[in-house]
Amino acid sequence: MTGAAVDVSGLVKKFDGKTVVDHVSMRVEHGEIAGFLGPNGSGKTTTIRVMCGLLIPDGGGGTVLGYDLRQRHKIKREIGYMTQRFSLYEDLTIAENLDFVAGLYGLRPARRYVRDALADLGLTARRDQLAGTLSGGWKQRVALASCVMHNPKLLLLDEPTAGVDPKARREFWDEIHLRTENGLTVLVSTHYMDEAERCHRVNYISQGKLVASGSVAEVIAESRLTTWIVDGPHLSDAAHLLSGKPGVDEITHFGKTLHVVGRDASALERSVRAVARTTGVHAQIGDTTLEDAFISFMTNGEGGAR
Amino acid sequence: MRRFFSLRRLAALWKKEVIQMRRDKVTFAMMLGVPLMQLILFGFAINNDPTELPAALVAPTQDHYSRAIVSALELTGYYRFVYPGVSASEAERLIASGDVSFVVTIPSDFGRRVDRGDRPTLLIEADATDPAVASGAISTLGTVASEALLHEMRIASRDDANPRTHLNVIVHRRYNPDGISQYNIVPGLLGVILQMTMVMMTSMALTRETERGTMENLLAMPATAMEIMLGKVLPYLGVGAVQVIVVLGAAKLLFQIPFVGGLGLILMGVLVFVLALVLLGYSISTFARTQMQAMQLTFFYFLPSLLLSGFMFPFRGMPVWAQWIGELLPLTHFLRVIRAVMLKGSGYADVQASMLALGLFVVFFALLALARFRRTLD
């Protein structure tokens, strides 16, 4: 297939006159894992729903797997969509749910597809358990099983690991990486920075607008932030003194260190050095993290809206 | 704060309930709408002593005696001769199809017998499938007709002497000679029971998916609106089949309701009716946002359909506007079919109009539901 797996531009979606998605353009190449990040209510879910044909955009357009966004029925056949909230039938067993899904996609023989999906995700022992009685991590596995059973070319995951314990999260991501090796393309929205760092590319959306896009290193570079790592005694005094000083945009506590982040590198250096002298803390330049970059995007986004 | 009862806690709960009640506009509308509807329906539409019932007159020789009797009967207010002067076979068809509730037959030798001083005979056939309809009209019949005849004879003979002739009125309560009300109620109950379950169950078809959050997943998968609709309603045909067996079995064994007509025709009527019901319920579920609203909309439909379909009160006894509303309810047409076939032994030709109406409901509700179905989450 030529072109990108997802290639949309200028997407606009309004609800009751409120613009939730504001001219979002995004490309996801075949075989890559694209991260979709942004604060709550920034329009991630809405954008994903537009891509999988669950919402009709008010503006813009593009293609998903080469199909125009309006060819919703064709898109639905070839993508897998995992909703944010568990949306399989809680009063059906795991096997019954999968059998239902297999039937809707016309998979034959359904029994073999179900058996393979159960085996792939280690669900065979629980096949006859009601989906409603499963814990968060298991529900997520069942949901994943149900949306990859028909071997989709593109997987859209909407906060798949929310409320799932770290071990289950890691297993989930291993599963995703395994599948991309076989050519699957994944677009995944998340709040977790460690998950964002496992993506080939990340897209950051704030207040309905796409504000950054690229590899993790590119996004960090794009933020033009300088980070100083401060440690030593009297850290809270140092933090207190630093806040509001020229060049200091953000102060974050990390255990026994402070991350002091700012855009204006020289002003930030002057402020940090001055505080280091008066309080006796030790300051050195450090790496800007993705999280620092995103928090900076978030605060700028809010500032821009006001 | 008190331990067992605190006014402040009570006030907090009270306030919360009022806010929620106000937010749910449908419920609020129901609380105002249902009593109003009941008031209007009970107050104006329902009449246990129906008047102006359609009647046919079979009178081969129309003379002044027969005219006097007919006008006297019309003056009672119970009879309205919509078919004056039809043949006996035509009259039979009219009463079988339910177009008339009465057939008044004045034999051809009626006038001669009166003039000769013999005892003339008047035959009244009443459709007694609903005994309530016929009772008032029949009870006034004998005296009214006799008086009319006597009056007419006095004029004719110009004589104050009391003529000896007495009128011999023969009343045939057709289809239900003993006036057993179960004959009317039990077949009707089949319709009401089917309606209760079919409409209520299917009215939650989509709202249940929405409320449980499974709708998003369902819509994200390749299923069409038609597939979802049929998949949702067809299982209830099986439930309906069980109910039909139970009610018809009870009708036969417990209530000894006569089964005059063909079972095949009954089952065909039931099938079309149930299809109309499940699609009506499914249509409701495309309007309601929650299961609660679906339930309320269902009751909003149940009330008029129980009162205006002819199930509880005689259809013919209602004012015309109420009859028109009744015509828009599937139950009305089903009751006509099931009562006609079970009690009167009517054939397809007699119930064709009602069958077609039921078929129209099926098509209408299916199209309505498909048009209303939201393929997206917009």
Image (tube, rainbow, N blue to C red):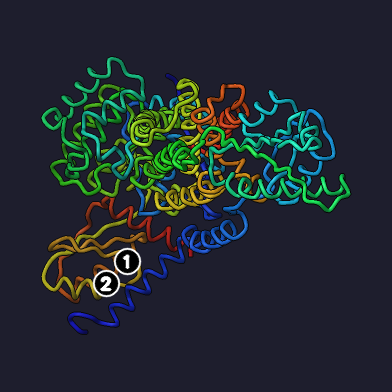
| Disc number placed over residue A242 in the picture, else none | 2
Q: Secondary structure at mark 1?
A: loop
Q: Is residue B260 above or below residue B130?
A: above
Residue density around tag 1, few if under 14, some if 14–19, many if 20 or more, within 10 Å: many
Seen from the viewer's position, the closer of residues A217 and A146 is A146
Which residue is situated farthest in the top direction here?
A: A109
Tell me the kind of residue under disc 2: Leu
State how far apart marks 1 and 2 are (Cα): 7 Å
Q: Are marks 1 and 2 on the same chain?
A: yes
Residue shown at 20%/36% (left/top)?
A172
Q: Mark 2 — on which chain does it sit?
A: A
Task: Identify which amino acid the numbered label 1 is placed on.
Answer: Val
- Rendered-image quadrant of the N terminus of chain B: bottom left
User: Residue at left 45%, top 63%?
Assistant: B23
The residue where tag 1 is placed is: A248
- The disc, 1 or 2, on the residue closer to the chain's N-terminal end is 2
Residue A174 at what x, y percent from top left? 18, 33
Residue for point 20% across, 70% down: A276
